[in-house]
Image (cartoon, rainbow, N blue to C red):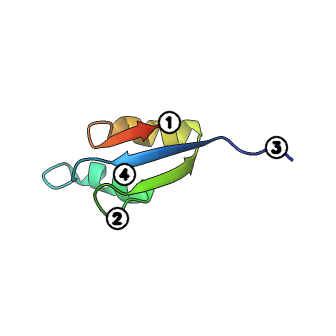
């Protein structure tokens, strides 16, 4: 069995004041609070969601 690639993402800015779809994307990524770190599977769909809210999140190594 091979281990799936993961990516760690931290929310660094609030979704307040941004469009509803951007807030929904943060929830879809699993964020509940500021500075929370989530570990997600590294797939094209997740990368697209991160790209949509790239001004609110930071990808960690």
Image-quadrant location for residue 3: top right
Report crowding for label 2: few under 14, some 14 to 19, many 20 or more residues within 10 A (C-alpha).
few
For the residues marked 1 and 2, what is the alpha-carbon distance in whole angstroms?
21 Å
Nearer the observer, disc 2 or disc 4?
2
In this picture, residue 2 sits left or right of residue 14: right
Rate crowding at label 3 as few (under 14), some (14 to 19) or many (20 or more) other CA atoms within 10 Å.
few
Q: Nearer the viewer, residue 40 or 36?
A: 36
Mark 1 element type: loop
Secondary structure beneath dot 4 equals helix
The residue labelled by disc 3 is: 2
Residue occupying image coordinates x 20% and y 49%: 19
Cβ atoms under marks 3 and 2 closer than 8 Å? no
In the image, what residue occupies the spot 24% across and 54% down?
20
Residue 26, percent from left and from top = 35, 53
Reply above or below: 51 against 22.
above
| Of pointers 3 and 4, the one earlier in the residue sequence | 3
Which is closer to the viewer, label 3 or label 4? Answer: 3
What label does residue 29 carry, if any? none
Labels 3 and 2: the sequence-earlier one: 3
Question: Where's residue 14, x and y in %?
Answer: 21, 53
Mark 2 and mark 4: span between their CA atoms? 11 Å
Q: Point out which mark residue 61 bears.
A: 1
In percent of width and height, residue 38 lies at 47, 54
Residues at badges 3 and 1 in contact (C-beta under 8 Å)? Answer: no
What residue is shown with label 4?
25
Image disc number at residue 32: 2
Q: Residue lying farthest bottom?
A: 32
């Amino acid at each position: 069995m091979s281990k799936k690639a993961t990516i760690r993402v931290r929310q660094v800015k609030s979704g307040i004041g941004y469009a509803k779809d951007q807030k929904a994307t943060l929830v879809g990524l699993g964020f509940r609070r500021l500075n929370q770190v989530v570990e997600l599977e590294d797939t094209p769909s997740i990368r697209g969601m991160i790209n949509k809210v790239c001004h609110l999140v930071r990808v960690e190594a």
